[in-house]
Image (spheres, rainbow, N blue to C red):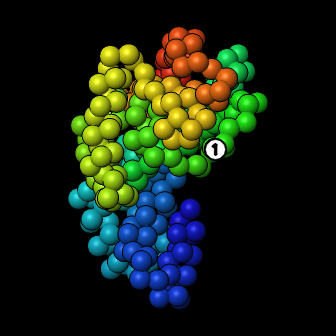
Amino acid sequence: MADQILKQIALAEEHNDRQFVTALARGLSILSSFGNSDTALTHQAICDLTSLPKATVSRLIYTLLKSQYLVADPAGGYRLGMASIQLSASAWAQYNITRLAQPLMSRFASENQVSVSLAKEEMGEMLYLASVRSPARLAVQLMVGSKVPIARTAIGRAYFAVADEQQTQLLAFNMQAQNPQTFTADWQRLQDHKIYFEQHGYALSNGEFSSDILAVAVGVYNRAEERFTHSINASAPSTRWHMDDFIRDVAPKLQVLAHQISTQS
């Protein structure tokens, strides 16, 4: 990983890429030099692994120590600090949720003849991490890597409804940066649908994102982070289901599915 970062630094310098923050990349190359949290590296070893000048390594180590991404090892050298370990644990937990969710989602989609998708918020939109499509064709075919608006989708509304204060503040910032012209109306829409979620235990979208899509969604709790970090939906063509029947038959089962994913992750 450190080698890849160093190659990116060289390319950025070669092409005079002003958007590339070289100092950040150099700091990341140092963190990438550590195999795991038990690995201790000396100052010289870090210089050798990163090919960075000693003075640069000294300044970066100082910054990483201050921010707790590195700690001094009692036997000498440095190890990954708690900030690095927490970041790694958070990333692994998110990956683990997706990996464990996929077989459960596949069975759910097959048993209920619906599409099922798992997503998390990214820069003011919902990013699809896993998706199992039903045989029914929809006007909008979403897949892993697709992004959808938060305020007009069940999966986005569910995430907002279960988000904590820190997540909500970040979401407001991201949504305003993404679509400043529609932010006020979208934010009010989310507030209204949060009330609906609190009353019913699920979020609903009926033709608001795409005219032929009926969807319900709930949050997925991340035990590693001790908060909701994902949401999951079930969707189907609105021409094949009456909304009340869909809610009655699918929403309670989706709540059970979200709980299964949370407890296994």
Residue 46 in the image: state x and y as whole percent. Answer: 44, 68
Element type where label 1 sits in the image: loop
Q: Residue at x 53, y 66 (%)?
A: 2
Q: Quadrant of residue 31?
A: bottom left
Residue 204 in the image: state x and y as whole percent. Answer: 45, 27
Q: Quadrant of residue 220?
A: top left
Q: Residue at x 43, y 64 (%)?
A: 28
Kindly identify which residue carries mark 1. Answer: 140
State the residue in front, 224 or 58: 224
Q: How many marks?
A: 1
State the residue in front, 265 or 182: 182
Relative vertical location of residue 45 with respect to residue 118 in this rendering, above or below? below
Residue 210 in the image: state x and y as whole percent. Answer: 56, 41
Q: Is residue 201 left or right of residue 137?
A: left
Identify the residue at the far right of this view. 135
Q: Quadrant of the N terminus?
A: bottom right
Q: Residue at x 57, y 76 (%)?
A: 7
State the residue in front, 129 or 151: 151
Residue neighbourhood size for the residue with mark 1, other residues' Cα within 10 Å, grouped as few (<14), some (14–19), many (≥20): few
Q: Is residue 47 left or right of residue 141?
A: left
Relative vertical location of residue 183 with respect to residue 157 in this rendering, above or below? below
Q: Residue at x 43, y 26 (%)?
A: 203
Question: In the rendered structure, which amino acid carries the disc numbered 1?
Answer: Val
Residue 96 visible in this rendered orientation of the protein: no
State the residue in front, 97 or 48: 97
Q: Quadrant of residue 157?
A: top left
Residue 131 visible in this rendered orientation of the protein: yes
Residue 215 in the image: state x and y as whole percent. Answer: 54, 28
Relative vertical location of residue 43 with respect to residue 153 in this rendering, above or below? below
